[in-house]
Image (cartoon, helix red, strand yellow):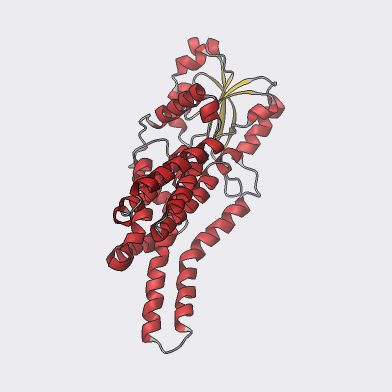
Amino acid sequence: ESHFILTDVPVTALCILALWLSLRASTLHTVAAFAWAGAAIGLTAAAKYNGGVVAVALLIVWLREYWEGEWGRKAAAAILAMIVAFTIAAPYSILDLPGFLNGFAAQMSRFAIPRDYGTPIGMIYLKHLALQGRLWVFAAGAGIVLALARRERRGLWWSPLWFAALYFYVLETHTPVFARYALPLVPVICLLAAVPIVELAAVAGRFSRSPAALPLVVTLASLAIVSQPAIQTVSWIEGLKSRDTRVVAADWMRAQLPQKTRLVVEITGPTYMSTAGFSVTRVENIKDRTPAQYVRSDAGYLVISSGDLDRYQDYAQLGKLVFEIAPLNQRPGPPVRIIQIDRAEAVR
């Protein structure tokens, strides 16, 4: 879990910074402003490679700067700052260039593996984004229409809109699917969802003589949008007080299995067992390898954290189910099943 906190949340914060500095460059029209935006983009890409998509926001600004002068200097400053910031934040990309290139290629190949989720990937991400309240997603859709309808303000919206469109395209065309991957879209959605609120407040201000009309509309409309996500967030935090299924499974393994036992753990399961003295191989999905490959390996246990065990029947037959736990209302987390590989049984 700490790995997710150290990547997806910071890259979202850095995306906000990069978008703001890109918009700032579009208003200042200076070489220095482009350099600062480029540096923020470099830091975002260093935090997580997919964060580099935010570069499209500055690219849109730069393309619109053709008539402002110093076109080449602005591009050079942005690119140089981007490279320097990325290198400072991820120095081993230079210090260990072969390792960096091999790791980057491995990551890209991982995201190129086709997987069938039974539902279009884009629709899955839209459902994840709407889980905390559909109103804000609908408000963001209305915000797109309103933002593009105002010609005098349209230019400022092209950068965040192109970023959101391209980032969503990257999500929609690559696997695996995790809700947290959509976090960098949240700031743009929030901005867009605010547009109808501002428009409603402006209408109220024009038609009402009361000076309280405008702040009242802004307050009520904002509460309508944020109340459901706020309630869901409080509920989620309360759920963290309960013992997660992964914690229970981890405690069982610490108590029942000898140290240095070799585990193959899906990344949605308790992948942190190496700190308890186990040898852990983390995999995206147990099914990424065939049952025969696990039999030939030195793995002792498979830790499955998928809800659909029927799709794992061939793997369940590799040995004995020694532990199983399912989530409950007061016990969050994925279902966890631990299978002890019996090579003699598997061969028969």
Q: Is residue 276 left or right of residue 156?
A: right
Q: Is residue 30 above or below residue 263?
A: below
Q: Residue at x 35, y 34 (%)?
A: 116
Q: Residue 158 or 77: which is nearer the viewer?
A: 77
Q: Residue 191 or 3: which is nearer the viewer?
A: 191
Residue 203 in which image quadrant: bottom left
Q: Is residue 271 above or below residue 201?
A: above
Q: Residue at x 61, y 53 (%)?
A: 237
**Is residue 150 in sight in this rendering?**
no
Residue 208 in which image quadrant: bottom left
Q: Residue at x 64, y 20 (%)?
A: 261
Q: Is residue 275 left or right of residue 40?
A: right
Q: Residue 218 or 320: which is nearer the viewer?
A: 218
Q: Is residue 130 above or below residue 220?
A: above
Q: Residue at x 48, y 50 (%)?
A: 36
The quadrant the N terminus occupies is: top right
Q: Residue 145 or 315: which is nearer the viewer?
A: 145
Residue 259 in which image quadrant: top right
* Position of residue 23 measured from the top left corner of the image (x, y, whole percent): 41, 57
* Position of residue 266 measured from the top left corner of the image (x, y, whole percent): 52, 30
* Position of residue 232 measured from the top left corner of the image (x, y, whole percent): 53, 57
* Position of residue 21 measured from the top left corner of the image (x, y, whole percent): 46, 54
